[in-house]
Amino acid sequence: MIDLRLLREDPDLVRASQVARGDDPHLVDEVLDADARRRSALTEFETVRAEQKSLGKLVAKAQGDEKHALLTRAKHLAEQVKALQSDADAAEAHATELSRRISNVVEDGVPPGGENDYVVLKHVGEVRDFDFPVRDHLALGEGLAAIDTERGAKVSGARFYYLTGIGARLELALLNAAVDKALGAGFTPVITPTLVKPEVMAGTGFLGAHADEVYRLPADDLYLVGTSEVALAGFHMGEILDLSAGPKRYAGWSACYRREAGSYGKDTRGIIRVHQFHKVEAFAYTTVEDAYDEHRRILGWQEEMLALAELPYRVIDTAAGDLGSSAARKFDCEAWLPSQERYLELTSTSNCTTFQARRLGVRERTADGSMRPVATLNGTLATTRWIVALLENHQQADGSVRVPAGLRPYLGGLEVLEPAR
């Protein structure tokens, strides 16, 4: 949720953020107007309520005609208080609904524009020059008896799959390597719920413009998460945190579910864009002052994971119009995909500043004893999709795949994945 104090004190900053995102800047004025009406309604209610309380003390002491007149006045005030309470509640609800439509204020320096207006910050690693016909990940995976999309479709429908044999082992290797990386950086590993309540899903910003991506179970009024970020953001919902010793860091391991609505025909071959996958997600609660640096630290740990997998990649600064509503800034790491000769997103990390914490009521007590919202950040450490880049970048002419040295301990020392015979 947007900081209303910031909105009142610097509406032009919020308007500029809206413009950079391609959102409606006039919404800022609507929220300011609704907020003014909310405060006015609340002030009127509190004034009459105070008079009602004072009158109650006079009634207790009065007698005869005076008491009768005061009781009549008290009855009238009670009706007025009830009506004003209703008006104040309605104004509060309207102001809250409007304010939730404003996305987080983008960080200074975020590129303006849409999906294709990102800025490439750097390239890392050499793109391999193959001297044999390149196979895509599905052909390689089928040759290794690692990926089975036909049976996945037979059992569950389009864009479901089985990882079998070495495919299952490869996913577990990647995720366990991610957990080890997280442990080394001071994260607490967490196996998270994959079903959450509406207030948690809404609190993280996933029920806005992209609500059609989310699976919902109407009979239970629960949502399937598309990332463990959601459950981890809700972990400390309604709590006051002690951040005096530094950020609270969690690494969530979970299955993730996404409807992928509107993306038919785009990356639908194989396991690039699927409805279910596994992921280890880094999540941090920290102070507002530390959020910028924590964001860069998470990016650094992601790059260490990509180095372990020996993948050539680039880092991009995502444009404002391509940010989720809760993110003030997002960096993506994209690995080279030889079969399509393009880059494929493998990780993203977002600084959500206080946006999610305001909605979820996660606060810290400052040195002077006051309360304020914390900042939340998230970032991918490994997902099922990494298998795509691993198979394609490390393939060999005979259909085998070289195992990067950093992953070999997680695969019992295997150096090469051999085609099934």
Image (cartoon, rainbow, N blue to C red):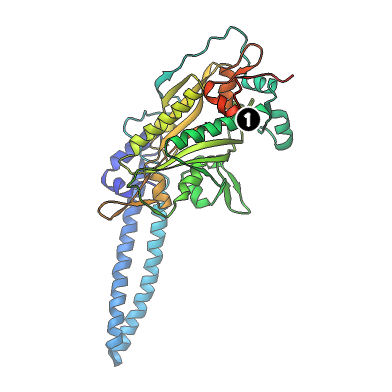
Farthest residue, direction top: 131
Quickly name the residue at label 1. Answer: 169
* Closest to the observer, 34 or 292: 292
Q: What is the x, y in percent for residue 409?
A: 56, 27
32 vs 280: above or below: below
Report which quarter residue 88 is drawn in.
bottom left
366 vs 396: above or below: below
In the rendered structure, the answer to whether residue 259 lies left or right of residue 291 reads right
Residue in the image at 55% along x and 25% along y: 407
Q: Residues within 10 Å of mark 1 (few under 14, many from 20)?
A: some
Residue in the image at 60% along x and 21% along y: 391
Q: In what element is the residue under mark 1? A: helix
The quadrant of the image that shows the C terminus is top right
> How many circles with numbers are drawn on the protein?
1
Q: What is the x, y in percent for residue 94?
A: 41, 54
Q: What is the x, y in percent for residue 389?
A: 56, 22
63 vs 406: above or below: below
> Amino acid type of disc 1?
Arg
In the rendered structure, the answer to whether residue 362 lies left or right of residue 413 reads left
Q: What is the x, y in percent for residue 39?
A: 31, 58
In the rendered structure, the answer to whether residue 351 lies left or right of residue 213 reads left
Query: Does the image show residue 207?
Result: no
Query: Does the image show residue 152?
Result: yes
